Amino acid sequence: MRYRGLGLWAWGAFLVLSLLTGCSLPPPSGDQIQALNQGEVLTLPSQHQGALTPADIPAPPAPGDPRWQAVSLPDAWDTRRPDLQGYAWYRLRWAPAMAPAAGQPLSIYLPYASMNAQLWVNGQLLGQHGRMHEPVTRHFYTPLLFDLPHGVLRPDGQANEVLVLLMGYRAYRSGLDAVYVGEADALQAAWRHRHFWQNTGTLITSIIVLTVAVYGAALWWRLGREPMFGWFTVAATVWGVRNLNFVATELPFGLHWDNIAWSRLSVSGATVFIGLLALFTLSYSRWVLSKDRLPRWQQAIPLAYVAFSVIAFGVQDDTGGMRVWFKPLGAGGLLLTLWSQWHLLFTAWRVRAKQVWAVAISGLAYLALICNDLLVANDLEGLGRLFLRQYAAVPLFLSITLVWTHRYWQALQQAETLSGQLQREVDAQRAELEASFQKLVKAEREQALAQERERLVSDLHDGLGLHLLTAMNMARREGPAKQPLADTLQDCLDDLRVAIDSLSNLEDRDPVLLLGSLRFRLQPRLAAAGVQLDWQVGGEIPPQPWLDASRALHLLRLIQEALTNAVRHGQASRILLRIESTPEQAVRISVVDNGVGLPLSRTEQPGHGLSNMHKRAQALGATLEILNEAQGGTHVRLTLDAPQRV
C-alpha cells in the first residue's frame, strides 16, 4: 500500500505539473495602470537589419509616414512577420484616465521585448537598456522597466505617444507584448515578479546545478571514475551553463559574441543535455538494479542524438535555419526522455525504494515541464510565457544527489562499523596472543631454568663432586698430609666460585667483568704458588648479548683450564691474561705463559684436558688455537666471533 500510494502521488504530481504547461504570469493591474495593446507598426527595409554602430540605429520615422500599419499586441514576428530580421517601430497612444498626482512616480513596463528595445515618449528619448547595435544586448527573456518623468507628458486632455524601437531576429521568438503605463510601484512589483521567475530564479537554479556538478565530479573522482557519475557531472555542467542563456544579457570581460552563435550554443546545449541525461538515467537504473554497464547500443542512441543535434545546429548561420531543425530534434529529445524515464519508473517499481521513487517522481516533473517548454518554444502566437524546465532539473538533480549521499553515507557507516568490529576482534586477538606469549615466555623461562639447573648440577657433579669425593677419601686416611687436602678443598671452592661467576653479570653480558672476576679469585692462589698473573685489556670491549649463563660457564672453564695447564704442566712463573677487540670486531682472549711449553705430541694429539677445552670452544662457537711460543712457553688464543653470535 505504501508504494502504491507513492506511485499514485507520482502520477498526481505529473498531472498537476502538466496543468502548468503554457503558464504565464498575470499582467499588472490597478486603477492607475493602462495596458497599451493597440497601435501601429512600421518595419524597416533590409539595409537596417542589424546596425553595426550607434550611428546606424534608425531614427524615429515621421508621424505621417505611409508605411505605418495598424497592429495589436502581442505582435509575434514568427507568425505575422516570419521573414523580418532587424528593426521595427511601434507607435502607441494613451490618454490618462485621470491626471497623476504631482509627486506620484510613473513608469513604463515592457514584459516582453525581444531582442532589445529603445523607448521614446512624446518625441523624447526615454532610454534603452544596453546596445541596440550588433551585438545587440540580449533581453529576449528579460522584462524592461523605464522611469517616466512627468515633464515629458502632455497637458491634460491630450494623448501621449510612445514609440518603441524593437530589434529582433528571424524565427527567434521576436516581437513586442503589451506595454503598460502607470503607477511606478505597481509596475515595479510586476517587473520584480517576472524578473524573479525568468531571471533571478533561473540564475539560482544554475548555481545549484553547477554546485551539484562539482559534487558529482568529486564522486566521480572518489569512486573509481564510474561512468555514471561522469555522465551526471557533464549533464549538470552543460545544463547549468546553458541556462545562463536566460540570465546573461552581456558576456563578461568585455567579450562580444554574435547573437546567432550564442543561439547555436543555447539550443545545442539543450539537446546535448537531453542526451547526457538519458545516458545518466539509463546508467543509474542499471546501477540500482546491480546490473552490468550499459550495452553499447543503449549508449549509442543518446550519443548519436547528441552528435546529430550539434552538427545540425552548428552548421546553421541563421536563426531561421535553426528553427527548421528545432521541431524534429525536439520531438526526438522528447522520445529519448520518455524512453529513459520509463527505465527509471520501471526500476523504481522493481526495487520499491523511497529514494529511487524520489528520483523517478522528479523525472516525471522534469518530463512534464519539457512538454511545457516545447509548447512555449513552438507557440508562434503568444509571447511572454515562461520556460519551466530549468526549475524541474533542480529537484531531479538534488534527489539524485541525496540518493548518492545516502548511499555514500551508508557505505561510510558500514565501513566504520566494520572497522570498529575489526578493531575489537584485533584487540581480542592481540590480548589472546599476548596472554599466549606470556605463557610461552613463562614456559620457556621455566624450561631454561630447569635446563640451567640441570646443567649446573651436572657440571658441579662432574667437577665439584669429583673434588669433594677426593677430599673425603683423603680425610678418611690415617694421618693424611694437610696440604694435599687443603689443595683439593681449594679446587672445590674454585669450581664453586666459577659456577657462581657464570651466573653473575648476566644483564651486562660483559666478558671483561666475567674474566676480571676470575682473575680476582685466582690471582691470590697463583701468587702463593709463586706465579705472577698479569692482566691486560686492549681497546673497547662491547657487551656480548649472546653470553648467557651456559656460555659464560664454558668460557670460564676454558680459561681456568688454560691457567691450570700453564701452572701444572708448563711450570710457568708468569702468565698474561689478555682480552682485546680485533679489527673484525671480534673478541680475542689470550693466555700466554713463560713455561716450558707443550710437548709436540700434546699439541698434535691433545689430552683429555685439551680435548675438553676444544669442546667448550666449539660450544661457544669460537676458534681455539694452542701454540708454542718461539722464546718458550704456551700461547692459548680464543677468538669469539661476536657478530655471528648476535
Image (tube, rainbow, N blue to C red):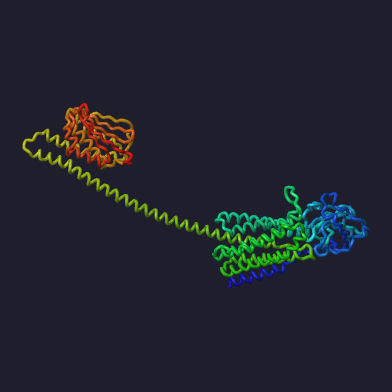
Q: Nearer the viewer, residue 507 or 55?
A: 55
**Vertical comparison of 435 with 506: above or below:** below
Q: Which corner quadrant holds the C terminus? A: top left
Q: Residue furthest left?
A: 478
Q: On the picture, is 285 further left or further right than 557?
A: right
**Can residue 520 be seen in the rendering of this structure?**
no
Q: Which corner quadrant holds the N terminus? A: bottom right
| Image position, residue 86 (x, y; %) | 83, 56
| Image position, residue 333 (x, y; %) | 68, 64
| Image position, residue 239 (x, y; %) | 67, 58
Q: Nearer the viewer, residue 319 or 175?
A: 319
**Can residue 217 be seen in the rendering of this structure?**
yes
Q: Residue furthest top?
A: 631
Q: Nearer the viewer, residue 331 or 386?
A: 331
| Image position, residue 108 (x, y; %) | 83, 57
Residue 298: which quarter of the image? Answer: bottom right
**Image point 19% across, 42% down: which residue?**
460
Q: On the picture, is 431 further left or further right than 526?
A: right
**Image point 74% across, 49% down: which residue?**
255
